Each structure stands twice: as C-alpha cells, then as structure tokens.
Amino acid sequence: MHIVRFFPIGNADTCLIELANGRRVLFDFADMHSPDDADDKRCDLEKELREILGDDTEIDVVAFTHLDQDHCNRAKEVFYLEHAEKYQNDDRIRIKTLWVPAHAVLEAGVKGQARTLRAEARHRFLKGEGIRVFSRPEELDQFLIDREIEPAKRRNLISDAGTLCPEFNLGQDCVEFFVHSPFGKRDEEDIVRVRNNDALFMQAVFEVDGEQTKMILSADVGHEVIDDIVEVTRYRDRDYRLEWDINNIPHHCSYTALSDEKGNEETEPTATSKWLYEEAGQSAGLLVSTSKPIPSDDEDKQPPHRQAAAYYKGVARKLNGEWVVSMEHPTISKPEPLVIEIKSTGYKIRKQAPNVVVETPAPRAGI
Amino acid sequence: MPRSRLARSVVRYLSESQVHPYATLRDFSLRGAVDVLDIDLDLSLDQRRSVPICSTEPIRIFMANDDSWSPHVISTRSDFPVGLVHTNLDPDVDGGLCLCIWEEDWSDLATSLTGQSLIERIRAWFTAMAAGTIHDDDQFLEPLILTGSNTLIIPAGEMEGPWHIDMALKHRTCSIVSMSRAEPETPIFEEDFAVYSPCLPSQVHRGLSNTPYDLGALQSLCLELGFNLIEGLKAWLLESEHLASAAHRRPLLILTVPKRRTVEGVNEKPEIWCYTLGGSVAELGERLDVTITEDDTTAPKVLGDISNAELSSIRMDPWRVVQRLDRSAARVFSGSSRAQDTPLLGIGAGAIGSNVATIATRSGLGPWVLVDGDITLPHNTVRQVQRNISVGLSKAYVLKQELDSVLAVGGNTSISVNVFNPGKEQASLDRALRNAEVAIDFSASPAVLGWLTDQPAKRAASAFFGPDGSDLVVISEDLSRSIKLDEIEAQYFWAVATEERLKNHLIAARLDRIRYANACQDLSRPLPPWQVHTLCGLAAGRLAQLLVEVNAGFRMWRLEPDIGAVDSVCMPVHKVSRFQANDVRLTVSEEVVRTMRMHRRQSGENETGGVLLGTFDLVRNVTHIVAALPAPPDSQQTPTYFIRGIKDLKPIIERLAKASAGRLHYIGEWHSHPGGVPARPSDDDERVYTHLKTHMEPSGSPFVMAICGELDTWLRAGWQERETVHGVIAHGEE
C-alpha cells in the first residue's frame, strides 16, 4: 500500500507520498500556520511531517514545483541545505534529491525563501549531484557555460517534459513519475526559452498487485499551460499519461486554471481542460483542492473561486467520485490532513475517527 | 430528546464528539414507541468497488424507545442497489431497504453497543459491502427468507426426500419434528402431521425476501420463483391418504428450493422452507374450498373453487430447518479442509484411543476401525469414553457404538481381538490395515508399536502418554513409510535421554522396565480425567495435522498439572539406513553417521572411535543404532590404530539407559579409518569384532562393529542364532 497525504495549510501546497517500499517524495513544503493565532486552523506542517518521518532524517525526493511562498514557506528553516553552513544541523531534514523546474535555477531577482532555495538548487546543480532539473532551455546551458562547466556534463541531471523521472520506476518502487511541464518553447527568435511561472506538472502512476492508480499533480499552472500539455500529449497519442484517479486540481481552485472567464455560477472550462477532467478522469475519481474553504460569495478575488469549485464538484458527481477541499476535510471547524491509501482497489480516503484518549498523552495529573 | 438510551448515545456522539465521527445527524423524530434517527454516513471506500456504494450514504435507524430490540437500519437512498446479500429484498414499510447489520443476538449486542460503536458498525457494513467482502466465498449461501422458532430436523447428506417423521415433540410452545430417510420402526408422535413437500425451480441466491406469514404471501413468493404452490397443495389435499386422516393431522409444508451462486452455476445446498398452517388438514381443505368435512370424514368438494379462497387470511408459522450432521458437514463445522472421509484404524480403545477417536469423529475424521481385545472394566469409565452400562462388554465394540452415535452417519467398525491373536479376524484386520489412511497405535505397548511397524499399512503412527500421565507423545511415519514407526521410536528414546526439553519424561517409569507408558494400565496410579482429556485433545489435533503432512513427525506435549501449562516440543526425525539379512534387520540413523564423520574429521590424521548405542527387539529381530558416542578421554588415538578407553563411559551409558527407561543399550563399537584407507575391517578390526562376539553373543544382545571411512561407513552386526548383517552407507556431502 502507498500513502498520499495532503495537508490543511490554507491556499498552499504540500503533498507527501510514502511508497510501500519505504521511500518518500515530498511535493512542496509550505508551512503556513501562525502559531500565535488561536483561530488559525492551518496545521503545524513541520510537526506533522516530523511525526510521520519518526526517526528518519532524510526524504528521498523533495520537489519544489515552483518557488512561490505558498509552495516553499519555511523550507529554509526546516531542511538541511548544503550550500550554507547556517542551514546545517542534525535536527534538520535532509533532502537526498531535490527536484526543481529550470526556472528555479535561473530566475533572477528573487528574495527570501525562494532566493535560499535557488542558491541550494544552483549549488547542487553546479556540484553535479543531489538534484534533478526539469526542462532544458538554452539559458540553462548558458548558465553552466558562464560558470565554466561543460553543459553536456550536467545532462544526466536534467529531465525533459515527456519523460519519466529516473529516481523511481515501477519495477523497484511500484511508482513512476511522468513529467508534463515545464517544457521549453521556441520564441520568435527560434530560441528555446523557459517560460516564466512554469511549474512542475506531473503524473504519478502507482502500481499495487498489477493494478494502477494515477495521480495528477498540477501545482499552480494556468489553463494555458494545461491547454498546451493536453494538446501535446494527445498529439503524441499519450492520452493515458493524463488519465487520473486522483487529481490535485491546480492553483487552489482558481478559475484561471480552467478558463479566462470565471462565469456566474460555474466556470466553463476550455475544451482541453474539459477533456482533462471529464474524459481523462477515471470512474470514482477524486479531486483535491488544496485551498481555503470554498466561499459562498465573490468577495475575495483570490482563489478558491466558488464557480471553479462548482465545476469540479460536478466532475466528481459525474464520475461518482469525491471532491475534497483540504481546509474542509473532514470539517471546516477542525480540518485534518487528508490521508489517501492506494491499494490494488484504487484510492481510499482514510476516514477513521481516531481514539484520541488512547492516541494522545493524558493531561498532567497530580498535585 | 430520544427516549432510547442508545439513540441518545448516538445523538451525543454525532453532535458532541471531539473527533469527527464521519457521520452527520440530519433529523430525529418519535414515532409511537420508536425513535427514528436520520443520518448521513461519510464512508471510507475503495475507489474500485464491487457494489456501487457512495461516499455519502443516507440511512435511517429505528430504535425501540426502551431499547428492547436491535436497531433496524434502512437505506434512504432511492437508488440504493436492490437484491444484494445481507439486505432485505423488498422495501421496508418506511420505504427504505433494510440492512442486515447485526449477526449477534440483541441480548448480547446490547451489552456493549455504544453510540459510537453503532455508527462504526454501520459504516463498516457499507465499507465491506462496497468492497464485496460482506459475504465471504467460504460462507454458506444467504437464506432467501427468515425463519421462526419451531424446528424441523432433516437427515444428513443430500437434502432430498422422501422423508418420514420419526419424532414429533412439543417443547414448551414450540414444535420439534425430526425426519428420517427410512420409515421409523417406533416413531414418537406427540403431534400428528401430514407432510406436503414439493421442490421448487432452482434460484440464484440474492437478498432476503420478507418472510411470508400467510399463504397468500407464500403463494406470491412461490409464483415469483416459478412455482404454483396452491395448485400443488390442492392436488395434495385430494390424495386419498390425506383425505382419510385430514381431521386429525396438521399440515406441514416442507418446500425445497435448490440454489446456486450465479446464473450459470450449479446447484449447491438447497434451502428448505417449513411452515405449519393453523388448523388441521381438513380445515385447510375447507378454507381453500377444495374439500368438505362432516363427522370427521373429509371428501373432495364437488363444486369447490380454489380461486374463492382468501389466501392472505390463512396464517402460517415459519419453522427453523436444521440438518443433522454427516462427516462432511462435521468437517465444515470443525474447520477441517478435508474434502473426503478418511478411513482410520485405531489399535487400542482405551483411555487414549477412545477419547482421540471420539474427538476425531466429532471433527468429521473417520470412519474408524477399532481394534481392542479387552473388555470394559469398571475403572475404565473414569478415563475412557465407555460408560457404566458398557462394563463387561468389548471395549472396541462399545466404542464403535459410541462413535456411530456422535453424528448422523455411522460406518465405524470394531474388531474385538488382540492384534497378536486375531484368530478368524485376521482377514478383516488385514483389510482394515490396508484400507486405513493412517493406522494409529493407541495401545501404550511397545510390542504393538513394533507389530504395527511390520504391517502392510499405508502409514503408521503411535500416540502414548509418559508414565506419569502428564506427557503426550505422537510419532508418525512419513507418507512413503521411508522411516518406519519403530525407527522413530528408537530416536525418541535417544531424544528423551539427551534432550533438555524432554528431561525426566521417563523418570516415573517402572524400574522393572516392562512398560514405558504404563499410566493407563497401572491401577495404582491415579490419573485425573481432565488430564487425559487435555492430552487426548492435543493428540486428536495432531492427528488432523499429520493427515495433511508428508514428512515423519515426533512431537511431545508436556503438561504441568499444577498450573495447567502445556509445553509443545517438536523434535527432528532423522532418515535411516536399513539392512536386512533374512529376518534380521539393522537400522542406522543418519545422525549416527553424521556424528562419526564429525569425530573422524576432528581427529585429523588419527583414528578415533567410540561406542554405539541403540535399541533392539528380540522378537522381531530388529536392532536400531541411534547414537555414536565420542572416544572416552583415555582412548589411544594414532594414525594407524585406535584403542577405545573407558573413562566415564560406564556412568554415561548407565545414565542414558536410565533416562530411556532401560531401552537404550550398548550395541557395539565404532572407529574411523584415515583417508585413502577403505572402511573395511583390517586384521585388528576383525579381532575387535571377535572380542564383541565372544562377550556379547552369550548374553543374547546384538553386537555391531562400524568403521567410518572417508567415502563410506561399513557395518557388521551379529546376534545369537541369527544371520549376520552387513551394510555399507555411502557418505553424501556434509
């Protein structure tokens, strides 16, 4: 059995995958909670993660889909970073292999967490180990040449869109990760350039007893990127690479991931998005929105947008599946991590009322 | 607030629980004496489901206001799948589909069902239903309808008539009717019934139908299943036999419904429905407008029309139907996976044999052939199955009778002879030996064990107690009898003399060394029946195990009577090499050769050696070598000769002899030859053999000389008035 977890961290992303063989992959780490705010229902992500890891101090792969704060908040406080001593002590969680889009190495003018993670990505990339960079724009070659490194010597650390990540395979790990995005595009000067804000968009294929369960991780991509991905993938007759049983819908349930138009009551998706959700979605599929609770009005311009949620809910209904919002699971008043078991019978959301009395320490007693 | 305490508990759980209960209370209402809760369940489901259960399922729970009956749970989803097993086929009066959540009696369930556990049980039911695991493949098929409290007992085996009533009893307000295949010689009738027993067309098993309580409902159900019950009943009522006794007999309807798992499947165990109708056969005939009765005489009604009958006004009482057990059914109920009967032969119908055979019979293992020449004595009734009424009768015969009465099938036989003097029973004894899957010695006699070894059985085993009655030993041959029972017994003696876990096993043995397991025969030694039953239970369990095992086995269970603890010891059984000359047999356990080779290797260039220990049987002319002791420390070991010393040897052999109740003996000498020198006797070696012959032959004991070389081990065994046996054992890889 594999386990996939999403965490109630507001409009932010963190997805931990624990494989049956013990290996782990963490997609983004955004510890957003405010310890001083008693009303903040977002979980203490670092505490949750450390409880799951137990005595382990290393995660096999930590992927930062892009370096926005809602995908990497407090990463520099929690992880052991190799590029600077101040991020190194035994209490920190080590990263065996870092996955980042090329943009995370090349992006200029970044600050805070993003700047620290960019330094870590650059350090590992230049050192030539412990990293995988996704997509190969020509700027990446120039980045290496500027630092007197022959680009060919770093090719093994780069994965193009349309390939499988070599860190995992179905034979050994019972999982494979197929990368759809980012992908370089030729500009008007016929130069392959990385596109700003191109985040990782992947399909994870789990296998248990010969039965596959597929998950789409779509980070913060907009509908234009999805349109490109669907078109390219279908053009190459690889529809199965977009099939999903679990779909972590993009950008915290923003309508922009479906269309340019929000719609009045329900967002009307582009034709390609419609295909992705309604045709590539498998029977009883699960849609997960890693977001705040769905509002009942349009007061807040930021996602989640109720119109987009209405569309996704309709997809879940049509598939006889489930629609889960991370900050609403199992209740808005007490959100908890969403734990999904993956077995030969597909996914299953763990819905077990814990025995709190037994599973937590008793209050202090005595005089 | 609900009046039912359980309903209040559910409400509090759903509204006040500190953790999310994955269920939401939607509504609550009072309806007469019933509290009604409407709840949405939030379910944890596999994505790929066998049954289309949804992640949110609405249910309604009906609870008695005084919690006097189990909560009824219905689905309120309009498109909830109909016809599933563990659901009621027809929508309940409230418009929902009743779910069979509880398998316990309410009186048991009520003691521990909290609001939380009730919700969790219902959630678990949905989860299992979705996964298709709510009815396991090895479970019996679901009944099509529920039944009542009167009981019909039908014969074992094929559920097909014709049957005859052999007993009709009243127990308080309930009726009990027992049927037999043969017409009973002396039936017991406290009530008089006339039986109508049609067979319906075969059905695919499915959800429960509502139990019909009137003839109209039963007729509807039968028509749905493709059978016109009323037409059949009419023809039956008009049969002269039923007309004659119509006024005095109650009609008993026994309907057989063949069932299969799938449309294409073959019929499995049929379902039997049994009903009584309120009055007599005559009254039924009149209500159906088929017959007319005057002055106790019933006749066909000439202008009668059955379509005039008000079927729904004819009330019926559904009966529980149970089937007597044959061996096959007993195996199912006892958890045995054996498909077929297992012919078994038990030699000895005493304390061990009678109890083991009885337990095995209850487990569906048999039929048994029981061999015992003794009669039942008064003291036997303490430890044996035979009772006071059997005192003076043949033990084997009485046990056969007891076994025949355990289940609804007999088939057991007895041979009341001593195996050493079978007389005219020789042929039947031989037949039983050849026929039995396993012939088991329960006699507690080493001689019988030896006798059984030599018989043409498919496989032999022996079960016996230690002398103080607190140890049980079961030894069993492998399927191909490559290691014989007496060879395992010889290894048992070596093990009890040397193995720490078997220490003191034979310490209570009588010093005259006549028997090693004399507990059962020794009248002076009290042995509580619970101890006998405990160990016999283990022996019966072991018997069931060894029937499916291929290899030879040696197990001992050691009971500590003071605290009731039982230790189980499983010892290895070593292969043997066997040599024969006419009627003389010599066997050497693989362990002996391994030991000699080890000492030879450890002694380097020097020759080494020691003494051989074993058991023998003067009557059967068999010698078993089970141990090779190392050279005593005062031995002389050189590259060209070996002189076995004596230091500490005598006390060692005496200790081993005592620990084995005198069964382990000095058997002879062994020594090694260096590499390059064949393991064949030199002139010096011949002088050793002559020395053995000179000193041992007059005593009557067998004597053996063995030479362990690099490639093989050579043996020669002599014995007074018997053929000399030679043997060579080729060495394999170590």
Image (cartoon, helix red, strand yellow):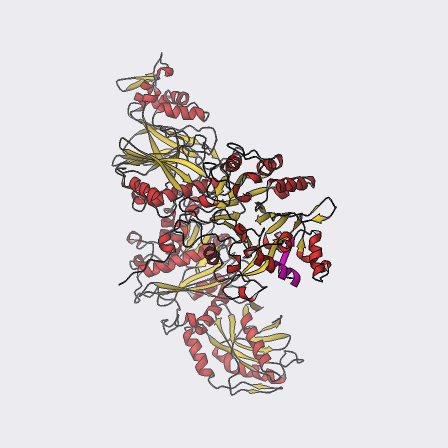
Examine the structure image and report whether residue A127 is included in the region drawn in magenta.
Answer: yes
Count of numbered labels shown in the rendering: 0
Indicate whether B103 appears above or below B547. above
Residue B545 horizontal/vertical position (percent): 46, 56
Examine the structure image and report whether residue B422 is included in the region drawn in magenta.
Answer: no
Of residues A262 and B66, the one nearer the viewer is A262
Specify the segment rendered in magenta: A120-135
When asked about the image quadrant of residue B150, the answer is top left
Q: Is residue B588 left or right of residue B651?
A: right
Kindly identify the residue that appears in the image at 53 percent across and 48 percent down: A343
In the rendered image, is residue A249 in sight? yes
Kindly identify the residue that appears in the image at 32 percent across and 39 percent down: B70
Indicate whether B97 appears above or below A50. above
Of residues A60 and B250, the one nearer the viewer is A60
Residue B424 horizontal/vertical position (percent): 45, 54
In the rendered image, is residue B700 in sight? no
Residue A187 horizontal/vertical position (percent): 71, 45
Indicate whether A165 appears above or below B564. above
Q: Residue furthest top?
A: B303
Q: Is residue B241 left or right of residue A89?
A: left
Of residues B378 and B242, the one nearer the viewer is B242
Residue A209 horizontal/vertical position (percent): 57, 49
Q: Quadrant of the C terminus of chain A?
A: bottom left
When asked about the image quadrant of residue B12, the answer is top left
Of residues B431 and B511, the one nearer the viewer is B511
